[in-house]
Image (cartoon, grey):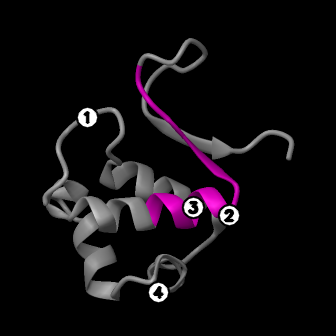
């Protein structure tokens, strides 16, 4: 099943930003998410993760969240738009 465009889906920009926040390379993300490097490259490419399976998107989201990243979605009270940040507290 392919991902649908909704607030739960990630953007290519969010994936790149989360990697930057953690100082992770694409190979490091691929290892953490247990996905292939070409899959990560495609998800960060011009078409974004929208052509990836829901399972692959969730694997990337889970890898980042386990590393302490929070994804900000448009419309959140304190958010100006899509983004990433570190989790506050433990």
Which of the numbered marks, if any, corresponds to residue 6?
Answer: 1
- Horizontal arrangement in the rendering, residue 58 relative to residue 67 (left or right): left
Is-magenta flag for residue 72?
yes
Residue 57 image-quadrant placement:
bottom left
> Mark 3 — residue?
64
Q: Position of residue 23 (x, y in %)?
A: 63, 70
Helix, strand or loop at mark 3: helix
Q: Earlier in the sequence, mark 3 or mark 4?
A: 4
Residue 73 image-quadrant placement:
top left
Residue at mark 2 to residue at mark 4: CA–CA distance: 15 Å
> Mark 2 — residue?
67
Residue 55 image-quadrant placement:
bottom left
Residue at mark 2 to residue at mark 1: CA–CA distance: 23 Å
Instruction: Tell me the residue at 57%/61% (across/down).
Output: 64
Q: Position of residue 48 (x, y in %)?
A: 22, 57
Say above or below: 58 vs 7: below
Instruction: Tell me the residue at 50%/86% (across/down).
Output: 31
Q: Earlier in the sequence, mark 4 or mark 1?
A: 1
Circles 3 and 2, Cβ within 8 Å, touching? The answer is yes
The residue most toward the right is 89
- Horizontal arrangement in the rendering, residue 15 relative to residue 4 (left or right): right
The mark lying in front, picked from 4 and 1, is 1
> Mark 4 — residue?
27
Helix, strand or loop at mark 1: loop
Say above or below: 35 vs 79: below
Circles 2 and 1, Cβ within 8 Å, touching? The answer is no
| Residue 58 seen | yes
Q: Earlier in the sequence, mark 2 or mark 4?
A: 4
Instruction: Tell me the residue at 54%/20% (across/down).
Output: 79
Say above or below: 73 vs 11: above
Is-magenta flag for residue 56?
no
Say above or below: 10 vs 40: above
């Amino acid at each position: 099943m392919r991902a649908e465009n909704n607030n739960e889906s990630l953007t290519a920009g969010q994936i790149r930003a989360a990697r930057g926040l953690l100082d992770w390379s694409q190979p490091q993300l691929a290892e953490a998410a247990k996905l292939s490097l070409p899959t990560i490259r495609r998800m960060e490419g011009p078409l974004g993760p929208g052509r990836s399976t829901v399972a692959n998107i969730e694997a990337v989201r889970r890898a980042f969240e386990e590393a302490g990243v929070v994804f900000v979605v448009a419309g959140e009270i304190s958010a100006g738009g899509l983004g990433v940040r570190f989790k506050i507290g433990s």
